[in-house]
Amino acid sequence: MDNNFTKIILKSGKEQSLLRFHPWVFSGAIKQINGKVDEGDVVKVYSNSNEFLGIGHYQIGSIAVRIFSFDDIEPNADFWKSKLNAALNVRKAIGLIDNDETNVFRLVHGEGDGLPGLIIDIYKGTAVLQMHSIGMFLIRKEIAAYLKEIFGDRLVAVYDKSSKTIPFKAELNPVDGFLLGESDPVVVSEYGNLFQVDWAEGQKTGFFIDQRENRYLLQHYSKGRDVLNMFCYTGGFSFFAMKGGAKLVHSVDSSSKAIELTKTNVELNFPDDNRHEAIVADAFEYLSNIKDRYDLIVLDPPAFAKHRGALNNALQAYKRLNARAFEQIRPGGIVFTFSCSQVVSREKFREAVFSGAAISGRSVRILHQLTQPADHPISIYHPEGEYLKGLVLYVE
Ligand code: SAH
């Protein structure tokens, strides 16, 4: 079997992280590549003393191999189906399969499900695939077929949305589209709240599934409050707040498309409810002039740092943003604040929020420390998978 796949040999000592099941091989760890290798190829990785370490997809870049098995398996249909079934079993354990209230969830979360480079989101009967590695992109049609086998009639269509996530330099010229079946944009339900989802046009795979539990928590803090949902995108936090009994909800985003989506979704859930208003504005400007207007503020900005080089600027931005919210919120107010930048650690984010609080001089207590939901699991061996962090704060 060994002859089928190109063999990659690591420098002495560089096997340690793989022995602890970390799935990334950095290019600098490679001593030698025995044979020809193209981007996306399956390769086998060995230590300098010829010990098998793992099998994965090869790619040019700082992460050279993404390991999908630490056992010496044959990556055939049975193998991929068993990995997908394992991911499905986790969602069953969480209670997301055949759930009447929630029919939008993440089925496969990359490294968190032992499938680096593969994201699969389920929107009712449609699966949306987003490949982050060339190896996974090359087997997208097979993955779609396995999903169909597993889900049967419950799966109507599989849509591939990898054009913006696989490396541009690979020159694969990916075009987004259906790999299997066809479906129109759907209305999905999250805890009984309705969302219109357009995977083709929307950000990520169409919807920020990862805020489900945090939106649900917000619902319980909203009663009688004046709520600002900053960076609202599809408006999720807004109608959870309305459901929770908010007195008034203002949704703000710099994108007019997002504001239209929010309006549509609020109308779906609360037709003719005059508690809600949606506003196109820049966050930093809007937040500078809202003294004592709100007593619940949500800050869920886009990833300020997409790579390590941007870390310091991102931390400054989190600090300024949070300082504004603390300065302006009414006494006894509550702030839900988030970072979805993978390179910003939980500690660094908390430090930035701490600095923002210090600038405001207000007394601030941490009520909850939030993270991503269970259908975005984190492999204990791959802490980098913890990308979403949030704090719920009480501002005296
Ligand atoms: N809270 C949302 C997800 C937020 S995504 C949810 O629960 O689904 C981040 C949003 O921030 C995007 O919609 C983007 O248009 C918006 N955005 C980016 N920069 C902004 C700025 N400077 N001011 C206001 N909104 C901004």
Image: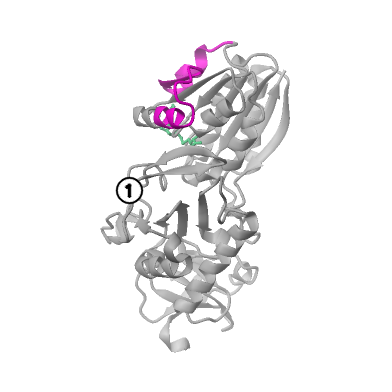
Is 280 covered by the magenta stretch? yes
Q: Nearer the viewer, residue 299 or 199?
A: 199
Count the marks.
1
Name the residue: 48% across, 82% down.
74
Part of the protein shown in magenta? 262-291
Quadrant that contains the C terminus: top right
Name the residue: 67% across, 22% down.
358
| Mark 1 residue type | Asp
On the image, the x and y values in percent for residue 38 come to: 34, 72
Vertical position of residue 361 compared to residue 39: above or below: above
Left or right of 173 on screen, residue 292: right
Left or right of 175 on screen, residue 340: right
Vertical position of residue 241 compared to residue 66: above or below: above
Vertical position of residue 86 compared to residue 364: above or below: below
Is 21 covered by the magenta stretch? no
Regarding mark 1 in the picture, which secondary structure is present there? Answer: loop
Q: Which residue is mark 1?
A: 184
On the image, the x and y values in percent for residue 132 come to: 42, 57
